[in-house]
Amino acid sequence: GENVEQHPSTLSVQEGDSAVIKCTYSDSASNYFPWYKQELGKRPQLIIDIRSNVGEKKDQRIAVTLNKTAKHFSLHITETQPEDSAVYFCAAYKGNDMRFGAGTRLTVKP
Amino acid sequence: DAGVTQSPTHLIKTRGQHVTLRCSPISGHKSVSWYQQVLGQGPQFIFQYYEKEERGRGNFPDRFSARQFPNYSSELNVNALLLGDSALYLCASSLWARLALNTGELFFGEGSRLTVL
């Protein structure tokens, strides 16, 4: 089955700096790659996603890149703000099965 | 418009007991998926139901079962609870069974936090 690895597990940045989180997946048939933000005690919320027919997608301060050949995708957050502090999960989807990474705890220091 | 709703929000059970968790999808969504999220880890896929039929099953023992009703709401049942079943159980809904190439996303509920003592 699909295996998703996510790095780093924790990330601390200064406010205004950029943050990058990387994920790799194993199943080349995966075709949808969402990123979720989960605040403590809250539901995972979709922040951006990318499909396998696209290499890059941007939404304001957030961007995602996908390298299908290397089977990895990355989340980029620019101009980080304290409210960006949360746990971020990547996921890879195939068929009807969504596999999540273990998460990255991002802390943005004011 | 209401999002995905789950009940109960918190519950405590003892080993060997049984639990039923409930989920109502977003209006119009026909697919419901269940995930288990152990503290400090990412959600793990348990089941997907679409139009009352099981469409996918993760690597969970037979103690876990689910069903979907004609109104697309769903129940997750766990029998013979173990300490390791303590987790946040998330329900997610989507419009279709598969998140097709150009449309569709999963919407999560707030979850049911189960503690097994």
Image (tube, helix red, strand yellow):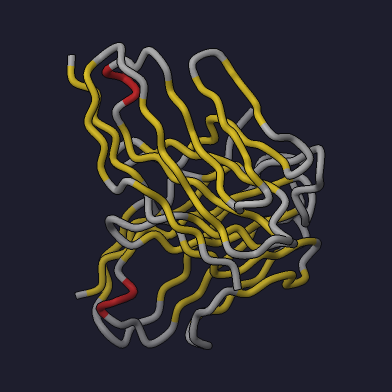
Please say if A16 is above or below A58: above
Taking the spot 69% from the left edge, 34% from the top edge, the residue there is A55
Q: Is residue B79 left or right of residue A34?
A: left
Residue A9: image location, x then y, percent: 29, 48
> Which image quarter is the C terminus of chain B in?
bottom left
Q: Is residue B65 left or right of residue B104?
A: left
Residue B53 image-quadrant placement: bottom right
Please say if B96 is above or below A36: below
User: In this view of the protein, which residue sits in the foreground, A9 or A93?
Assistant: A9
Q: Is residue A39 left or right of residue B51?
A: left
Residue A51 image-quadrant placement: top right
Residue B54: image location, x then y, percent: 72, 72
User: In this view of the protein, which residue sits in the foreground, A46 or B108?
Assistant: A46
Number of marks in the rendered image: 0
Residue A57 image-quadrant placement: top right
Residue A16: image location, x then y, percent: 30, 11
Please say if A34 is above or below B59: above
> Which image quarter is the N terminus of chain B in?
top right
Q: Is residue B35 left or right of residue A41?
A: right
Taking the spot 59% from the left edge, 34% from the top edge, the residue there is A65
Taking the spot 74% from the left edge, 44% from the top edge, the residue there is A52
Residue B96: image location, x then y, percent: 79, 50
